[in-house]
Amino acid sequence: MKYRAWLPLSLVLIVAHLTTAVSAQVAIEGELIYTMAGQPITNGVVVIEQGKITAIGAADETPIPAGAKRLQAKIVTPGLIDAHSTVGLSGLLNQPQDQEQLEHSAALQPELRALDAYNAHDRLIRWIRSFGVTTIHTGHAPGELISGQTMIVKTVGNTVDQAMIVPARAVACSLVSAARKSGDKSPGTRGKMMSMLRAELIKAQEYAARCAAAAADGEPKADPPPRDLHLEALVRVLQGELALMVTADRAQDIANALRLAREFEIPVWLDSAAESYLLIDEIKAAKVPVLIHPTMARAAGERENLSLETAAKLVAAGIPVAMQSGYEAYVPKTRVVLFEAGRAAANGLAFEQALGTITINAARILGIENRVGSLEIGKDGDVALYDGDPFEYTTHCIGVVINGRVMPQTPR
Amino acid sequence: MLQANERQDLAERVTDTNTMKRFSRTIQILTISTAGLLCGLLSVASATAAPTAFIHARIIPIAGPEIPDGVLVIEAGKIIAVGSFGDLSIPHDATTIDVTGRVIMPGLICSHSHIGGIGAADGSQPIQPGVRVADSLNVRDSGFKRALAGGLTTLNIMPGSGHLISGQTTYVKLRFADGSPNTIDHLFIRDDAGKALGGLKMANGTNSIREKGPWPGTRGKSAYLVREQLIKAREYQASIDRAAGDAAKLPPYDHHLATLVEVMNGTRIVHHHTHRHDDIMTVLRLASEFHLRVVLHHVSEGWQVAKEIAQAKVPCSVIVIDAPGGKLEAQHLRLETGMILEQAGVRVAFHTDDWITDSRIFNRSAALAVRAGMSRSKALEALTLAGAEMLGLQDRIGSLTPGKDADFVVLSGDPLSNYTQVLETWVEGAKAFDRSNPQDHVYAVGGYGAGHDQSPYYCCFGQGDQQ
């Protein structure tokens, strides 16, 4: 098959890695480059210098700096973005010691930061990178009413600090059955979930008001309230700095999330949203983006009514959609957004729309489009290289570049 | 089945010489298998009476090279001819269906599935070979329809892997052409004597290890417990032999031991869940000691002992997962397993392990294996004929060969492409899934109601959103 065809290139990549892992200049020549900013470029070049894209265009119009490391591929795309993962917290082994994605001691813990729980060495990070994923929005998993914060990192780095793009991006909220408890524990019902959320957000409003009063000029000077990390995180949601990422699959739970967004005027992202196809008008009117469940998610439990065509329906309606790998409790321990977007492309999404859900549209929803998501001058040098249609099962990812650094890669 | 004059009539209509040879073999099979009337009649009842010829398809027969412009002729639930358009003469009374641009391949065979609401052995003890998964199955489970939407026609439905021996598996054909069957019995695959066929599910490694007895706490204890029972079964058989038909001397019937006797005399295949390289070797040791006909299932670390598996001539039913890990024993799982086993000379099939992977995209397992270096031909066999062999059904299913059951799928494109859709699934000559039918479409793509049991009162599938 194509096996032989990509062997020489793989050798080039491996040798290149051995000699210089970090190069000041990298030039990627692609037969077809999906920039995700305008039309694809046939026979194009992307030039990366000092980690940033400095030139992109047709090969005959884009000079390659002398001494630049050169890579070639049939198809070139921006480094892929996984809009919602738990990789780095939910480790590969799936043993108690490597599972950091859920803290069950309380139902509401927005104060838990993702960066304190991230294992930059977990093998799953390398695994998803080997398919072209360079940026992940990761953190605490669905499963408690508010399980903690999320962050955005690159799939590279010896420490979380080296990987970091955005240390706190959203607060993870779950309106799913996994977050409802039995017996005398709360929340035990949908009604109780919403009541607890509203009460907590109102508390945060009051806390913010007291902080503001203390900071305001004038006499008599009010004392600031004692610092409360729990409420601080919710205040950041109220102020629009962090999104409230609400995992909800049943239509009534999605409607609850939209109602919450309206009442508190907070930025809500719908997460998973299996039955979102039933509420397209409502979601569109609320101007809420959807981080859609993996296309290959199991159609079971509250996702029993999921449709492989949901991403296509939402995109057709003009709703911002990003694809996610989601949280997996068992096998596979992570999904790969490349494959999930690919399945959406086989179920009604056009090729570039599907690619958009794991590149530029994901970047826009996450608010990092100034850095990643498309191949444009000034953006990070994050690139994925393929030997064919990236969504075809039998295509290989033959190279990954992050911040202008060519990552070690065996074609996969 | 067929009367002698009908057989002659059929034979006259098929003039291609190669086909004739194959067809005469078919006649032999048909003659030999007249005892299998029960299941035969069931399938014939829903199949077309006159021959049907599918013309101009790209045919992937599995047995033999791909045919760019092919013809598939079926009649009375069986394949009667396969060949190139122009070379093969089509029976004059055949209904022809033009499938230009489509691909036809055998119905996919999943050698390891858990759909239908499985439940066999309970929590009382780790070894329960007498318990049958068939007794737990709900024929209305929506999983069956999703499997058809993935082009599956035959399944080995297994109990779970939480026991050393969790019970008897059952082989089913997805005979849904006449709507939803009322009982699971309608799906059974039977032998010539009418007995419903199945294997025995065994497992080792961590799944069956628990803290308290009678459960094993270690791998050594696991192997010991199984050996102990097999030896007991051997003695049980010996005492039956010694009785020499004298009812007074017969030991009391023991359905657990009787099942183990079946696996030791080779009439029941052992389907053995095993991940780690050392656990795989334990199965091979056990198989050799007790002459078990065994299929290794999952084999996450099979790539580390490929040579040993090949030497033991034991086939592997491999799972393809999107990432390693999720459990300790799968931490070294690789997409290259199929390729490495193939190159070592091991017979490889894939399985869905549905719910672990979705039956609707079973073809993807083979495609990802090809991505990782497996040959296309062996990967396609791993979805079909190799699975049939692992169920001992290779004479009836698994390839488009005259005489075999007319189980096949009509695809919109290449079976290894992400963009290919299963358009139709035919079981024993009858169309059991049609993507263009809204009632079937909802199972192919999902939507409101798709996860529910199939129920007669759902008169209006696909319109649920509006109601």
Image (cartoon, coloured by chain):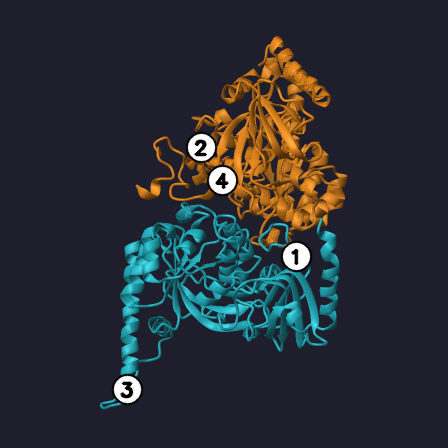
Residue A203 image point, x, y percent: 28, 71
Residue at image mark 2: B138
Whole-number angstrom distance, CA of label 2 to CA of label 1: 45 Å
Q: Chain A takes which shade in the image?
A: cyan
Q: Is residue A373 above or below residue B148?
A: below
Q: Is residue A187 above or below residue B401?
A: below
What secondary structure is marked by label 2? loop
Residue at image mark 3: A216
Whole-number angstrom distance, CA of label 2 to CA of label 3: 68 Å
Residue at image mark 1: A387
Q: Residues within 10 Å of mark 4 (few under 14, many from 20)?
A: few
Q: Earlier in the sequence, mark 2 or mark 4?
A: 4
Whole-number angstrom distance, CA of label 1 to CA of label 3: 60 Å
Give the amino acid at mark 2.
Asn
Give the amino acid at mark 4.
Gly
What secondary structure is marked by label 1? loop
* Label 4–label 1 contact, CB within 8 A: no
Nearer-the-camera pick, A283 or B16: B16
The chain that hosts pointer 1 is A
Whole-number angstrom distance, CA of label 4 to CA of label 3: 66 Å
Whole-number angstrom distance, CA of label 2 to CA of label 4: 21 Å
Task: State which quadrant residue A365 falls in.
Answer: bottom left
Q: Residues within 10 Å of mark 2 (few under 14, many from 20)?
A: some
Same-chain check, marks 2 and 1: no
* Label 2–label 4 contact, CB within 8 A: no
Is the C terminus of chain A in the top left, top right, bottom left or bottom right quadrant?
bottom right
* Label 1–label 3 contact, CB within 8 A: no
